[in-house]
Protein backbone atom coordinates (compact mmCIF):
# COMPACT_ATOMS: atom_id res chain seq x y z
CA UNK A 1 0.00 0.00 0.00
CA UNK A 2 1.24 3.47 -0.86
CA UNK A 3 1.06 5.95 1.98
CA UNK A 4 0.26 9.61 1.60
CA UNK A 5 2.98 12.16 1.05
CA UNK A 6 0.84 14.88 2.70
CA UNK A 7 2.65 16.71 5.48
CA UNK A 8 1.21 17.14 8.95
CA UNK A 9 1.08 20.87 9.68
CA UNK A 10 1.63 22.16 13.22
CA UNK A 11 -1.96 23.29 13.49
CA UNK A 12 -3.44 19.90 12.56
CA UNK A 13 -0.80 18.07 14.59
CA UNK A 14 -1.98 20.02 17.66
CA UNK A 15 -5.62 19.17 16.95
CA UNK A 16 -4.90 15.48 16.37
CA UNK A 17 -2.62 15.13 19.38
CA UNK A 18 -5.25 16.84 21.59
CA UNK A 19 -7.91 14.48 20.29
CA UNK A 20 -5.75 11.40 20.94
CA UNK A 21 -4.94 12.74 24.41
CA UNK A 22 -8.57 13.46 25.25
CA UNK A 23 -9.62 9.93 24.36
CA UNK A 24 -6.70 7.83 25.56
CA UNK A 25 -4.41 9.88 27.80
CA UNK A 26 -1.57 9.16 25.36
CA UNK A 27 0.53 12.26 24.95
CA UNK A 28 2.41 13.04 21.73
CA UNK A 29 4.95 15.76 22.41
CA UNK A 30 6.23 18.02 19.62
CA UNK A 31 9.23 15.64 19.34
CA UNK A 32 6.88 12.78 18.55
CA UNK A 33 5.15 14.60 15.68
CA UNK A 34 6.87 12.40 13.08
CA UNK A 35 5.56 9.31 14.88
CA UNK A 36 1.96 10.47 14.76
CA UNK A 37 2.42 11.47 11.13
CA UNK A 38 3.83 8.06 10.16
CA UNK A 39 1.21 6.11 12.05
CA UNK A 40 -1.75 8.07 10.72
CA UNK A 41 -0.62 8.33 7.10
CA UNK A 42 -1.80 4.74 6.64
CA UNK A 43 -5.34 5.79 7.66
CA UNK A 44 -5.31 8.57 5.04
CA UNK A 45 -4.49 5.98 2.39
CA UNK A 46 -7.14 3.54 3.59
CA UNK A 47 -9.80 6.27 3.59
CA UNK A 48 -8.48 7.84 0.42
CA UNK A 49 -8.14 11.25 2.04
CA UNK A 50 -5.72 13.81 0.56
CA UNK A 51 -4.45 15.39 3.79
CA UNK A 52 -4.46 15.30 7.61
CA UNK A 53 -6.92 18.15 7.92
CA UNK A 54 -9.52 16.08 6.08
CA UNK A 55 -8.65 13.17 8.33
CA UNK A 56 -9.19 15.30 11.43
CA UNK A 57 -12.57 16.47 10.08
CA UNK A 58 -13.49 12.86 9.30
CA UNK A 59 -12.74 11.92 12.93
CA UNK A 60 -14.84 14.81 14.21
CA UNK A 61 -17.79 14.90 11.84
CA UNK A 62 -18.11 11.78 9.68
CA UNK A 63 -21.06 9.42 10.38
CA UNK A 64 -18.34 6.75 10.74
CA UNK A 65 -16.40 8.75 13.31
CA UNK A 66 -16.87 6.14 16.05
CA UNK A 67 -15.49 3.37 13.85
CA UNK A 68 -12.58 5.59 12.82
CA UNK A 69 -11.84 6.53 16.43
CA UNK A 70 -11.24 2.83 17.10
CA UNK A 71 -8.89 2.70 14.11
CA UNK A 72 -7.16 5.82 15.40
CA UNK A 73 -6.52 4.08 18.74
CA UNK A 74 -5.25 0.95 16.99
CA UNK A 75 -2.86 3.18 15.03
CA UNK A 76 -1.48 5.39 17.80
CA UNK A 77 -0.84 2.75 20.46
CA UNK A 78 2.53 1.10 20.87
CA UNK A 79 1.82 -2.58 21.40
CA UNK A 80 5.26 -4.08 21.88
CA UNK A 81 5.24 -7.02 24.28
CA UNK A 82 6.53 -10.58 24.61
CA UNK A 83 6.13 -13.75 26.65
CA UNK A 84 8.04 -13.75 29.95
CA UNK A 85 8.92 -10.07 29.54
CA UNK A 86 11.21 -8.86 32.33
CA UNK A 87 11.83 -12.17 34.05
CA UNK A 88 13.37 -10.71 37.28
CA UNK A 89 10.12 -8.83 37.80
CA UNK A 90 8.02 -11.91 37.04
CA UNK A 91 9.99 -13.82 39.67
CA UNK A 92 8.87 -11.20 42.20
CA UNK A 93 5.34 -11.60 40.84
CA UNK A 94 5.55 -15.38 41.46
CA UNK A 95 6.70 -14.74 45.07
CA UNK A 96 3.82 -12.34 45.66
CA UNK A 97 1.37 -14.81 44.15
CA UNK A 98 2.61 -17.48 46.57
CA UNK A 99 2.14 -15.05 49.48
CA UNK A 100 -1.40 -14.23 48.36
CA UNK A 101 -2.16 -17.95 47.93
CA UNK A 102 -0.74 -18.74 51.39
CA UNK A 103 -2.95 -16.09 52.95
CA UNK A 104 -5.89 -17.82 51.24
CA UNK A 105 -5.14 -21.23 52.76
CA UNK A 106 -8.15 -22.65 54.54
CA UNK A 107 -10.54 -20.14 52.98
CA UNK A 108 -13.43 -21.95 51.29
CA UNK A 109 -13.97 -21.23 47.56
CA UNK A 110 -10.92 -18.95 47.42
CA UNK A 111 -10.42 -16.95 44.26
CA UNK A 112 -7.32 -14.99 43.29
CA UNK A 113 -7.97 -12.28 40.74
CA UNK A 114 -5.20 -10.86 38.55
CA UNK A 115 -5.54 -8.04 36.02
CA UNK A 116 -3.15 -7.45 33.16
CA UNK A 117 -4.19 -3.86 32.45
CA UNK A 118 -3.11 -2.92 28.90
CA UNK A 119 -2.24 -6.47 27.89
CA UNK A 120 -1.67 -5.78 24.18
CA UNK A 121 -1.70 -9.03 22.15
CA UNK A 122 -2.06 -11.24 25.24
CA UNK A 123 1.47 -12.38 25.99
CA UNK A 124 1.38 -10.97 29.55
CA UNK A 125 -1.87 -12.60 30.75
CA UNK A 126 -0.95 -15.91 29.07
CA UNK A 127 2.49 -15.77 30.71
CA UNK A 128 0.69 -15.34 34.04
CA UNK A 129 -1.53 -18.33 33.22
CA UNK A 130 1.52 -20.49 32.46
CA UNK A 131 3.23 -19.36 35.68
CA UNK A 132 0.12 -20.28 37.68
CA UNK A 133 -0.02 -23.75 36.11
CA UNK A 134 3.68 -24.24 36.86
CA UNK A 135 3.57 -22.94 40.45
CA UNK A 136 0.18 -24.29 41.54
CA UNK A 137 -0.25 -27.60 39.72
CA UNK A 138 -2.91 -28.92 42.10
CA UNK A 139 -4.29 -25.97 44.00
CA UNK A 140 -7.86 -25.68 45.21
CA UNK A 141 -7.70 -21.96 44.52
CA UNK A 142 -9.54 -20.57 41.51
CA UNK A 143 -7.30 -18.18 39.58
CA UNK A 144 -9.04 -15.60 37.39
CA UNK A 145 -6.99 -13.57 34.92
CA UNK A 146 -8.38 -10.49 33.20
CA UNK A 147 -6.60 -8.95 30.21
CA UNK A 148 -7.65 -5.55 28.92
CA UNK A 149 -6.53 -2.99 26.39
CA UNK A 150 -7.80 0.16 24.69
CA UNK A 151 -7.06 -1.30 21.25
CA UNK A 152 -9.63 -3.73 19.87
CA UNK A 153 -7.18 -4.93 17.25
CA UNK A 154 -4.63 -6.28 19.73
CA UNK A 155 -7.42 -7.93 21.74
CA UNK A 156 -8.66 -9.76 18.62
CA UNK A 157 -5.16 -11.09 18.20
CA UNK A 158 -4.93 -12.01 21.92
CA UNK A 159 -8.16 -14.00 21.67
CA UNK A 160 -6.77 -15.98 18.72
CA UNK A 161 -3.65 -16.76 20.76
CA UNK A 162 -1.38 -17.45 17.79
CA UNK A 163 2.23 -16.30 18.12
CA UNK A 164 5.48 -16.27 16.17
CA UNK A 165 8.81 -17.40 17.57
CA UNK A 166 10.12 -13.86 18.16
CA UNK A 167 7.60 -13.02 20.87
CA UNK A 168 8.26 -16.48 22.35
CA UNK A 169 12.04 -15.99 22.45
CA UNK A 170 12.13 -16.18 26.27
CA UNK A 171 9.96 -19.30 26.47
CA UNK A 172 11.83 -22.55 27.09
CA UNK A 173 11.33 -25.53 24.76
CA UNK A 174 9.54 -27.31 27.66
CA UNK A 175 7.08 -24.43 27.98
CA UNK A 176 6.52 -24.42 24.21
CA UNK A 177 5.85 -28.14 24.23
CA UNK A 178 3.59 -28.10 27.26
CA UNK A 179 1.46 -25.02 26.61
CA UNK A 180 1.42 -24.47 22.83
CA UNK A 181 0.35 -26.35 19.71
CA UNK A 182 2.85 -25.88 16.91
CA UNK A 183 0.97 -24.80 13.77
CA UNK A 184 3.96 -24.43 11.45
CA UNK A 185 7.67 -23.50 11.55
CA UNK A 186 7.02 -20.06 12.99
CA UNK A 187 3.63 -20.18 14.61
CA UNK A 188 2.35 -21.55 17.86
CA UNK A 189 -1.12 -21.49 19.36
CA UNK A 190 -1.67 -21.24 23.10
CA UNK A 191 -3.47 -24.32 24.44
CA UNK A 192 -7.04 -24.08 25.67
CA UNK A 193 -6.17 -24.88 29.28
CA UNK A 194 -4.26 -21.54 29.44
CA UNK A 195 -6.57 -19.65 27.08
CA UNK A 196 -9.58 -20.50 29.23
CA UNK A 197 -7.95 -18.93 32.28
CA UNK A 198 -8.06 -15.46 30.68
CA UNK A 199 -10.99 -13.19 29.85
CA UNK A 200 -10.35 -10.19 27.62
CA UNK A 201 -12.06 -6.78 27.78
CA UNK A 202 -11.79 -3.62 25.72
CA UNK A 203 -11.12 -1.08 28.48
CA UNK A 204 -9.65 2.40 28.43
CA UNK A 205 -7.63 3.15 31.58
CA UNK A 206 -9.02 6.72 31.46
CA UNK A 207 -12.60 5.46 31.68
CA UNK A 208 -13.48 5.47 35.37
CA UNK A 209 -17.02 4.18 34.79
CA UNK A 210 -15.90 1.18 32.72
CA UNK A 211 -13.07 0.31 35.10
CA UNK A 212 -15.51 0.21 38.00
CA UNK A 213 -16.86 -2.98 36.40
CA UNK A 214 -13.43 -4.57 36.88
CA UNK A 215 -12.83 -4.83 40.59
CA UNK A 216 -11.63 -6.81 43.60
CA UNK A 217 -8.24 -7.65 42.14
CA UNK A 218 -5.50 -9.14 44.29
CA UNK A 219 -2.76 -8.17 41.83
CA UNK A 220 -2.66 -5.71 38.92
CA UNK A 221 0.11 -5.58 36.34
CA UNK A 222 0.16 -2.26 34.51
CA UNK A 223 3.52 -2.51 32.82
CA UNK A 224 4.95 -0.30 30.09
CA UNK A 225 1.79 1.76 29.62
CA UNK A 226 1.96 4.89 31.76
CA UNK A 227 5.20 5.90 30.00
CA UNK A 228 2.95 7.01 27.14
CA UNK A 229 0.86 9.27 29.42
CA UNK A 230 1.50 12.75 30.81
CA UNK A 231 1.30 13.32 34.58
CA UNK A 232 -2.45 14.06 34.57
CA UNK A 233 -3.28 10.87 32.65
CA UNK A 234 -0.95 8.84 34.87
CA UNK A 235 -2.81 10.16 37.91
CA UNK A 236 -6.16 9.25 36.41
CA UNK A 237 -5.14 5.73 35.32
CA UNK A 238 -3.52 4.97 38.68
CA UNK A 239 -6.51 6.34 40.63
CA UNK A 240 -8.78 4.05 38.58
CA UNK A 241 -6.54 1.05 39.21
CA UNK A 242 -6.39 1.89 42.92
CA UNK A 243 -10.17 1.60 43.11
CA UNK A 244 -10.07 -1.77 41.35
CA UNK A 245 -7.63 -3.32 43.81
CA UNK A 246 -8.53 -4.97 47.09
CA UNK A 247 -7.02 -3.40 50.17
CA UNK A 248 -3.63 -5.10 50.57
CA UNK A 249 -3.54 -5.82 46.80
CA UNK A 250 -0.39 -5.32 44.73
CA UNK A 251 0.44 -3.20 41.69
CA UNK A 252 3.34 -3.91 39.33
CA UNK A 253 4.53 -1.19 36.95
CA UNK A 254 7.14 -1.53 34.21
CA UNK A 255 10.73 -1.39 35.45
CA UNK A 256 11.22 2.17 34.17
CA UNK A 257 7.93 3.45 35.62
CA UNK A 258 7.11 4.71 39.11
CA UNK A 259 4.39 6.40 41.15
CA UNK A 260 6.75 9.18 42.19
CA UNK A 261 4.77 12.46 42.07
CA UNK A 262 1.67 10.53 40.91
CA UNK A 263 0.13 9.35 44.17
CA UNK A 264 1.05 8.55 47.76
CA UNK A 265 -1.88 6.19 48.25
CA UNK A 266 0.25 3.12 47.61
CA UNK A 267 3.07 1.86 49.77
CA UNK A 268 6.29 1.07 47.93
CA UNK A 269 7.24 -2.40 49.11
CA UNK A 270 10.88 -3.19 48.62
CA UNK A 271 11.41 -6.42 46.79
CA UNK A 272 14.68 -6.12 44.86
CA UNK A 273 14.85 -3.57 42.08
CA UNK A 274 11.35 -4.05 40.77
CA UNK A 275 8.84 -1.26 41.49
CA UNK A 276 6.10 -2.96 43.51
CA UNK A 277 3.29 -1.13 45.28
CA UNK A 278 0.69 -2.21 47.81
CA UNK A 279 -2.69 -0.63 48.43
CA UNK A 280 -2.81 0.20 52.13
C1 LIG B 1 3.81 -1.47 25.23
S1 LIG B 1 2.26 -2.28 25.45
C2 LIG B 1 2.54 -3.10 27.00
C3 LIG B 1 2.01 -4.51 27.01
C4 LIG B 1 2.31 -5.30 28.28
N1 LIG B 1 1.72 -4.69 29.44
C5 LIG B 1 3.80 -5.46 28.48
O1 LIG B 1 4.39 -4.85 29.36
O2 LIG B 1 4.41 -6.22 27.71
C6 LIG B 1 1.22 -0.90 25.91
C7 LIG B 1 -0.28 -1.18 25.72
O3 LIG B 1 -1.00 -0.15 26.40
C8 LIG B 1 -2.20 0.05 25.68
N2 LIG B 1 -2.78 1.35 26.08
C9 LIG B 1 -2.34 2.59 25.78
N3 LIG B 1 -3.16 3.54 26.30
C10 LIG B 1 -4.14 2.86 26.94
C11 LIG B 1 -5.29 3.27 27.68
N4 LIG B 1 -5.61 4.55 27.85
N5 LIG B 1 -6.07 2.31 28.22
C12 LIG B 1 -5.78 1.00 28.04
N6 LIG B 1 -4.72 0.55 27.36
C13 LIG B 1 -3.90 1.48 26.82
C14 LIG B 1 -1.77 -0.03 24.23
O4 LIG B 1 -2.84 -0.30 23.36
C15 LIG B 1 -0.72 -1.15 24.28
O5 LIG B 1 -1.25 -2.38 23.88
Image (spheres, rainbow, N blue to C red):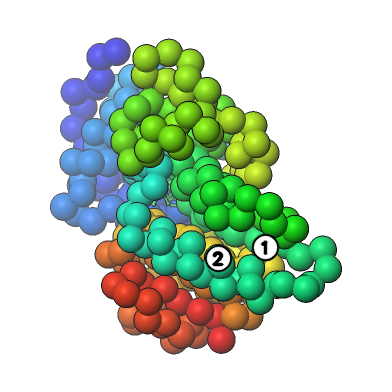
Question: Furthest-left residue in view?
Answer: 31
In what quadrant of the picture does the N terminus appear?
A: top left
Residue at 53% from the left image edge and 34% from the top image edge: 179
Residue 66 or 209: which is nearer the viewer? Answer: 209
Determine whether 211 is above or below 173 in the image. Answer: below
Q: State if disc 1 and disc 2 touch (CB < 8 Å).
A: yes
Residue 210 visible in the snapshot:
no
Q: Quadrant of residue 39?
A: top left
Give the residue at mark 1: 112
Task: Report the Cα–Cα distance between label 2 and label 1.
Answer: 9 Å
Residue 6 or 147: which is nearer the viewer? Answer: 147
Callout 2 secondary element: helix
- Which of the two labelled residues, at mark 2 and mark 1, occupies the earlier sequence position? 2
Q: Could you tell whether 38 is left or right of 231 in the image?
A: left
Residue 216 or 138: which is nearer the viewer? Answer: 138
In percent of width and height, residue 130 lies at 53, 45
Q: Quadrant of residue 241?
A: bottom right
Residue 188 or 64: which is nearer the viewer? Answer: 188
Q: Could you tell whether 79 is left or right of 34 in the image?
A: right
In percent of width and height, residue 103 lies at 66, 76
Amino acid sequence: MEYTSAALTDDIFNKLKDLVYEISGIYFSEQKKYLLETRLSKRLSVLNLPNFEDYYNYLKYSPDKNIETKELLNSVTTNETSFFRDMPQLEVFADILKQVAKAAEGVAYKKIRIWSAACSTGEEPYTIGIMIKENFPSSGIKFEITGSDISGQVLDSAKKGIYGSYTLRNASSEVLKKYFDKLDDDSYQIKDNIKNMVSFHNVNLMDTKEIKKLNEFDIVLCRNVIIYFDVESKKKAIANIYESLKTGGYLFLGHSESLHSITSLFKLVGLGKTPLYRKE
